[in-house]
Image (cartoon, rainbow, N blue to C red):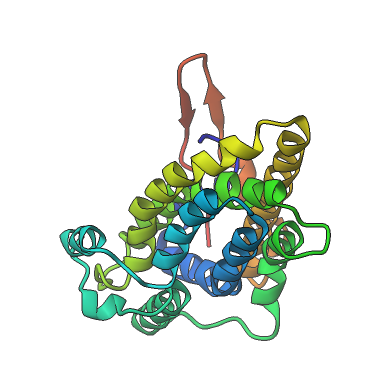
Amino acid sequence: MQHPVTNHTFLQSLALGSFKERTAEVATHFMHSYRAFSARFLEFLTALISMVHCEDLKAILQENSEEEKGVYDEGAKACIAAAGITLVFVGDGPHRDLFAKCLQSITEKTGVQVLQGDRYDHVSEPLVSTYHAMCCDKSANPARALGALYFGSELIVPSIYSKILQGYRQVPNLTSDDLSFFTMHVSMDEGHATQMRTVVMEYAQTEKGRRDMLEGIREVMKARAQVFERLVEACFASSSHGGEVSSTLYDKQVTTTTTTTTTTTRCVINS
């Protein structure tokens, strides 16, 4: 799925190395911010499962939930090992624990100074609150939750995480284990999206279902863009550029679109 969020300037800049010597810092601040969402993802998925009344559809979503809890079949274990990731590091806990383990290791190895106060909460707030509204609020329904979790997560995460991986691979001393959360989700979420598509098609049969899904998609995509914008401001607020950092970052990326290709030139950030 191609969407402006999956090709957001922040992600493109990270993948292209435009943050230069600050690549590790910016990517790790993203992880610290994203941790609040990662910690609650299983809660959002569980809320969706509870709203689905068809047992066959519920079973499809439950398979996704089992992997999120750290329960892998032999095929998944083989894929993890083939990626150079040690199963001992991955462990058998939920993915939020794996995320925290990767974050701790990366933060220690890169020496990134953690931002103080509630700055990470401020960055992640749009995404966490939007998913809560779509999945857990009194007004939540299965179609809205599917819009958020399928289109706004499982379908686009491989593209988003691939760019984060590209950024981190420019940082020395990081191992496959350190990056395992992102590597595993690039492959696993493609499978999750394929499985979840059956559930989506069921709820897309009515006009109301399609409208509710569209609302979930629209709100989550807007929230993801806000997270990237807030993150850039949090990372560069104290730099010599002051409040002009965000506009400088985006103004320097020039995108040329033709009928067949989109070429994005590398933006340069002087920091």
- Res 265 visible: yes
Q: Is residue 254 left or right of residue 164?
A: right
117 vs 69, nearest the viewer: 69
Relative image position of residue 64 (x, y in whole percent): 44, 59
- Report the front residue among 55 and 40: 55
Please identify the residue farthest to the right as the structure is shown.
139
Q: Residue pushed farthest front? A: 55
User: Residue 180's image quarter?
Assistant: bottom left
Instruction: Give above or below for 74 relative to 12.
Output: below
Q: Position of residue 127 (x, y in %)?
A: 67, 61
Between 208 and 56, the residue placed more toward the observer is 56
- Residue 233 pos. (x, y %): 67, 63
Residue at 33% across / 59% down in the picture? 183
Q: Is residue 248 visible?
A: no
Find residue 98 and report its image quarter: bottom left
Q: Residue at x 70, y 81 (%)?
A: 118
Residue located 74% across and 49% down the image: 219
Coordinates of residue 224 in the picture (x, y in percent): 64, 54
Depth order, front residue of 110/92 = 92
**How many numbered tags mark residues here?**
0
Q: Residue at x 62, y 65 (%)?
A: 44
176 lies above or below 103? above
